Image: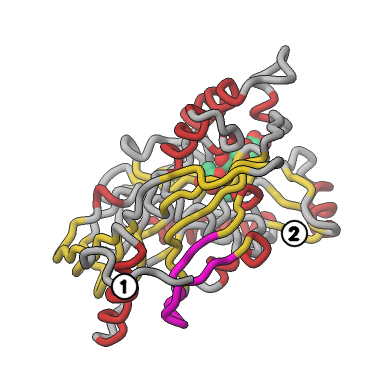
Amino acid sequence: MTRPQNASTPAKLIPNLGLKERNTFGLDAVAEFAYDISSAEQIPAVMSDIAKQKLSWRILGGGSNVILPSTLAGATLLMNILGQEIIKADDEAIYLSVGGGVIWHDLVSWTLENDLPGFENLALIPGTVGAAPIQNIGAYGVEIGEYIDHIEAFDVKDQAFVTLQQDACRFAYRDSYFKQHAGRFIVTKVVFKMPKSWQARIHYADLAKQFPDNASPSPEEIFLAVCKIRTHKLPDPKVIGNAGSFFQNPIIPNEQYETLLRTYSDLVSYPDTPGKRKLAAGWLIDHCGFKGQRMGAVGVYENQALVLVNHGGGTAQDILGLAKCIRDKVHDKFGVTLQIEPNIL
Ligand code: EPU
């Protein structure tokens, strides 16, 4: 792909930037210096500076999936590439191009206002569009990977812009090629393929319960139902710091699942790939008695045990200390190892 040379002004450099308002855990953190990236063209010069000075660096999107230390040494890139537009349509789909810095939930609302249904199950997920494919955000039976046509990114290893088609992104549960190659790609633009033949997807139990007498709700009705469930189950980061699900739902072999089921008949699980079963980590943590518990400034949310919260003044160490207690107890009781979902920077 060719790009115009010097098409934009250099990225703005901000020294000693406080990040407390830029991470949903509300952790007190300071970036030694931050680059405000508002266009893809700014990235090669920024990365070349970083390489020359041998600095450590990371990208910060919405800060909804990170655990920050008190000081982030080196360079922090604030992903701020905005804009969304319909770029083409064919018989099957409408193609939507979106900047990596657009807020995911704002995009969901925009698509519904513009009669482009598909993202309604993914309403209210915090974070940016550029971060969404990295962990393949998913909720209520839908994952973002299904809607991606291709992704444009800067490949830091090869110092070049690349385009990855959907297949190359290797989407799986909370996983992608970008996550497997952490620190290599900076996602600048996501092109979504929105099928013209929309169908309501309300098979996820919690969502189905919202429509007892209506098997074909509209996208707007689903959007409102998802917002209602999430608002009840998940804490608002503006009120209580959190990063959504703190652990992934563990995937275990069927034999291990059958053994657990003999002791715990109400164990919550879902079918996965052949021979595997996905367990509800929230259920495991809940059944270890952690729900609503506090450990100093941090704790386990009272309505959803999969969510760790910062009641105020908590640090990365406090959160990781609590996470260790939970992992150890779940492992002792069920023989299952939980994986932490947010990135520990
Ligand atoms: N459960 C408990 N106790 C709890 C929490 C859950 O028993 O404290 C049981 C529930 O009764 C339910 C089951 O566990 O039967 C699953 O709970 P829920 O529907 O809340 O979903 P989840 O598996 O805990 C996942 C995603 C969420 C997503 C929901 C809905 C992961 C790691 N998390 O949670 O994603 O919103 O499904 O699709 O896959 C996120 O990633 O930040 C996130 C919120």
The one nearer the camera, 181 or 212, is: 181
* One can see residue 195 in this view: yes
**Element under label 1?**
loop
Numbered circle sitting on residue 5:
1
Inspect the image, locate mark 2, and give the three-letter code of the amino acid beneath it: Ile
Q: Tell me if mark 1 has few (under 14), some (14-19) or many (20+) residues whose alpha carbon lies within 10 angstroms of its own.
A: few
Of the four image quadrants, the one with ligand 1 is top right
Inspect the image, locate mark 1, and give the three-letter code of the amino acid beneath it: Gln
Chain part drawn in magenta: 151-164
Residue 154 horizontal/vertical position (percent): 43, 70
For this orientation, the residue located farthest to the left is 15
User: Dividing the picture into quarters, in which one does residue 79 lie?
Assistant: bottom left
The one nearer the camera, 177 or 148, is: 148
Report the residue at 31% width, 37% height from top: 238
- Asked if residue 58 is positioned above or below residue 215 in the image, the reply reads below
Q: Is mark 1 within 8 Å of ligand 1?
A: no
Number of numbered labels in the structure image = 2
Residue 162 horizontal/vertical position (percent): 51, 71
- In this figure, which residue is indicated by the disc labeled 2? 252
Q: Is residue 254 left or right of residue 4?
A: right
* One can see residue 287 in this view: no
